[in-house]
Image (tube, grey):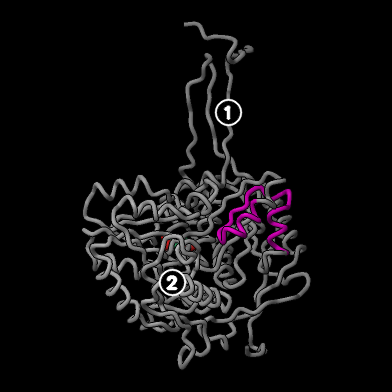
Amino acid sequence: MATITAQATTYHNFIDGSWVPSVSGDVFENRNPANTDDLIGLFQKSSRTDAERAVDAAVRAYERWRLVPAPKRAELLFRAAQLLAERKEALARDMTREMGKVLDETRGDVQEAIDMTYFMAGEGRRQYGQTTPSELRDKFAMSVRQPLGVCAVVTPWNFPMAIPSWKIIPALVCGNTVVFKPATLTPLSALNFVKILEEAGVPPGVVNLVTGGGDEVGSVLTQHPAVRVVSFTGSTEVGRTVSERAAPSFKKVHLEMGGKNVVIVMDDAKLELAIEGCLWGGFGTTGQRCTAASRVVVHQQVYDTFVDTFAARARALRVGDGADPNVQMGPSVSRGQLETVQNYITIGRAEGARLVCGGRALTGGPHAKGFFHEPTIFADVAPTMRIAQEEIFGPVVSVIACKSLDEAVAIGNNVQYGLSASIYTQDVNRAFSAMRDLYTGIFYVNAPTIGAEVHLPFGGTKATGNGHREAGTAALDVFSEWKSVYVDFSGRLQRAQIDTADV
Ligand code: UN1
C-alpha cells in the first residue's frame, strides 16, 4: 500500500449542521479498488462519542422538523433531487473511483437516488390516512401517519447512493431525523449525498453523517434509547446482530439482507435473451448485488446450448477499471471480497461442480493494482452444493439442470433467502404459476433478477428480510406509525361498545 501523502483530502463527519472531525481525530483510508495506489481521501474513524453526539443532535432537531408541514419538507427534497441530477456525472465518477463498478452502473446508482428523491418528494403531499364512519353519532374516526423520531440508517457499499436514498429520503419526508452510518468502503458517496441535502436546505441536525466501523458507531445506533428506527442493508449475519441489539429497546427494525436469486430458463425461452439477462444479472456490479442472478436453473432440453453460449459470452467480458468506457466488469470492492470469491471457487471445485469459465484472479498488467477476477461459471451444480446455497457476492454463477418447471421452482425455493427470482418462458401460464410459487419479494418475467424500480416495494422473504419493505409507499410504513384519532363532538359521554346509536 502506498503511504499517506500530504495531499490526501481529509473528510469530516456532519453533525448538527457542521462538518467536524471525530473526537479522537482518528481517520481511515479510502482507496480505489481498481488501483490501490489511488488514495481517495481520509475519513473520520468515529467512536461511540461521535455517534452519541449525532444522536443528540438528531433528537434536538426532531422537535422542529416533525412540525414542518410534509409538503414543505418535500420541497427541500425536490431541490435535492434537482441537485443530484445536475451533478450526476461527477457523483458517478466519485462512486466508480471508490467502489469499482463501471460508470454506466454508477450513473444508474445516482439515477436511482434521483428517482427515489423525486418520488418521495411527491409523497410529501400524499401521506394519506384513513377516515371511517364512527360507530356513534357526532363522532369522527380517522388515522394519521406520525413520524417516529430518530432513525439510524446503516448502509452497504454496493449501492453507495441509491440505498442511502431509499432510507434517508422517506425517513425525512415522514418527519423523522436521521443518523447515517455508511459502509467504510464508500464514505465519499455518502458524504456527497449528505452535502447535497445540506445544500438543498435541510436544517442542521436533521441529517447527521458519522463514518467509521460497525463496532463503535453501529453499537450506539442499535442500542441508544432515543433511536426509534434502525434501517439496515447488509449481510444476514450482521442483520441478526442488529436485530438482537435493537430488541431490548423495542426499536422498529427494518432489515434487508442476503440473497441467492434464481433465474429459471425454460425450454421455450428465447435463449439469446435469457443469456443476455444472465450475463447482466450475474456479472453486473461484479456480482455484488443482493439481487444478483447467482443461480440459473436451465431446462435439460436447452441446457448444453445454454451453458456453452453463456460461458463463451462471459469469457469475452472485458474486466478492468470501471472508469474506462470499454470495460464491462469492474473489480471486487476489496481484497477481502476478492478472497471470498477465490475461496468459493475452491469450494465449488471440491464439491465437484464443472468450472466452465473463469476461476482465476486477474493479476497482471492493467489488473496488477486492483482486486480483479474473471467472470466465473460453474455448470452441473447440484442444488445442495454450497456454491448454490450461500451468497458469494462476486462474479460467480452456478448453473443447475432441471427436468420441469415444478422441479425448477422447488430448487429456486430451496435456499434460506427469498429476495428475487425470474423466469424466461413464452408461456404465460408458466410465468404466472412461477410468480405465485416462488417465495421471494421480487419476481421478473423475461428479465434478470436485478433492476428493481423505486416506486414498488423492495425486499425479500425468509433470511433476506424481516417482513418490511423499502421503496415505494411501503417505505412510508417503515418510517411512520399510525395514530388513530377519535373526535367526539356530541358534547356528552358516549361509551364505545356500550352505548348504541339510535336509528
Ligand atoms: C442490491 O442488490 O443491494 O434491483 C440493491 C436492483 C437495484 C438495487 C439492488 N435496483 O438490482
Pointer 2 with pointer 1, Cβ within 8 A: no
Query: Residue most toward the top?
Result: 502
| Residue type pointed to by label 2 | Gly
| Residue type pointed to by label 1 | Val
Judge by depth and name the residue closer to the eye, 69 or 407.
Answer: 407
Q: List x then y, in percent, for residue 76.
A: 52, 56
For residue 232: magenta? yes
Q: Assess disc 2: are there few (<14), some (14-19) or many (≥20) residues with their C-alpha within 10 Å of its C-alpha.
A: some
Note whether ligand 1 is within 8 Å of mark 2.
Answer: no
For residue 447: magenta? no
- Numbered range of the magenta stretch: 216-243
Query: Residue most toward the bottom?
Result: 365
Judge by depth and name the residue closer to the eye, 213 or 500.
Answer: 213
What residue is shown with label 1? 485
Q: Along the polypeptide, which appears first: circle 2 or circle 1?
A: 2
Asked which quadrant contains residue 489, the reply is: top right
Question: Which mark's residue is nearer the viewer, 2 or 1?
Answer: 2
Visible in this render: residue 104? no
Q: List x then y, in percent, for residue 103.
A: 42, 76
Q: Where ligand 1 lies, by quadrant? A: bottom left
What residue is shown with label 2? 352
Secondary structure type for disc 2:
loop
- Left or right? Give the position of 79 relative to 22: left
Quadrant of the drawing holding the N terminus: bottom right
The image shows a total of numbered marks equal to 2
